[in-house]
Image (cartoon, helix red, strand yellow):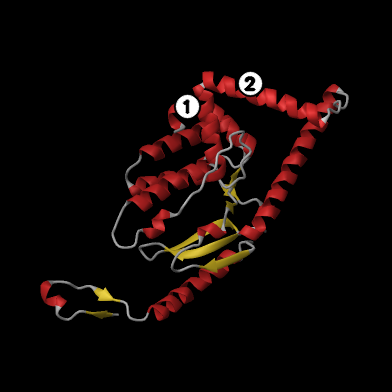
Amino acid sequence: MTCDLFAEEDGDSTLWLTDRDLLTRLAEGKLQPIAEQTRAEGWAWAEIAIDEIGWQRFPMRVREERRALTKREQARLEQLYVKLDEAEDRAEMEELEADIDTLAPTTWPAEELKLAGAVVTLTRDGVPKVERGLVRDEDVKALKALRRKTERSGALQDEDAGDGQTGASPPTRLSAKLVDELQAHKTLALRAELVERPDAALRILVFTLAERFVGGFSASPLGLHVEEQDVARSVTRSESKAPEAYETVATSWRDRLPTGREDLWRFMIEAEQQTLP
């Protein structure tokens, strides 16, 4: 580090970095134990990123899952989230987040854990931060296949349970051409219905955005392309509370939104409309 001797006379105490490589190596040495500890949690990999995280390398994420809550616990959880949304004091927010974690502890899905990893980096204040659940581009195909397998397994179990109760006969096979035509009729009918029901259209739109936000691949009927850019990494020359404020809100919603497709859609249906935008 060096400084301008003449500038000090005017009260300017700006310091200049003269050996960036040395500073980077020292920082990586401090973060290496954290990366090793994170890797020991069961992640497929853990790496260190000092300058910036190449988010485009991680098109999907694995999210923590909460156990099923009782109606009383769910009501209490919603109350805590309402208080968290209204809280402005940092200490109060941390206390509410701790209460949420205590009420509804989360776990990482064991099978998906093996296909994801973590990046250890530094915040703008120099505090170590671990971004878990990142899925590399080369592992996206395997993750999607795993999730489809899990969904099919759950669907088959539901069908077996239904068949055992009703004794229903196997469905009749339809030709591909007839299926396409029926699907077209269904699509046009849905379009006409959504024009008359903007509330339903809003819920479907938010569901589409939320699915991508929580790291899933979209099953929405909307052909909507969503691309998220980490613009916070461009904030390097001036102080701003915006990145921290956004991260707080984003973390709150990631914790609140279910990761399962059916649970997420149920959440959208039951949510009050003013909370959706």
**What is the x, y in percent for residue 164?**
85, 27
Residue at which label 2 appears: 189
Answer yes or no: do the residues labelled 2 and 1 have beta carbons within 8 Å? no
Q: Secondary structure at mark 1?
A: loop
Q: Secondary structure at mark 2?
A: helix
Q: Residue furthest top?
A: 196
Vertical relation: 198 (above or below) 205: above
Q: Mark 2, residues whose alpha carbon is within 10 Å: few (<14), some, or many (≥20)?
A: few
The residue at the point 76 percent across, 40 percent down is 152
From the viewer's side, name the closer residue of 150 and 106: 150
Is 50 placed above or below 148 here?
Answer: below
Counting labels gives: 2
Mark 1 nearby-residue class (10 Å; few <14, some 14–19, many ≥20): few
Residue topped by disc 1: 272
Q: x%, y% of residue 256?
A: 51, 40
Q: Is residue 70 in view? A: no
The amino acid beneath tag 1 is Glu
Image quarter of the N terminus = bottom left
Towards the viewer: 162 or 176: 176
From the viewer's perspective, tell me whether residue 164 is left or right of residue 121.
right
Can you give x and y, in whole percent of width and height, for residue 269 in the image? 56, 27
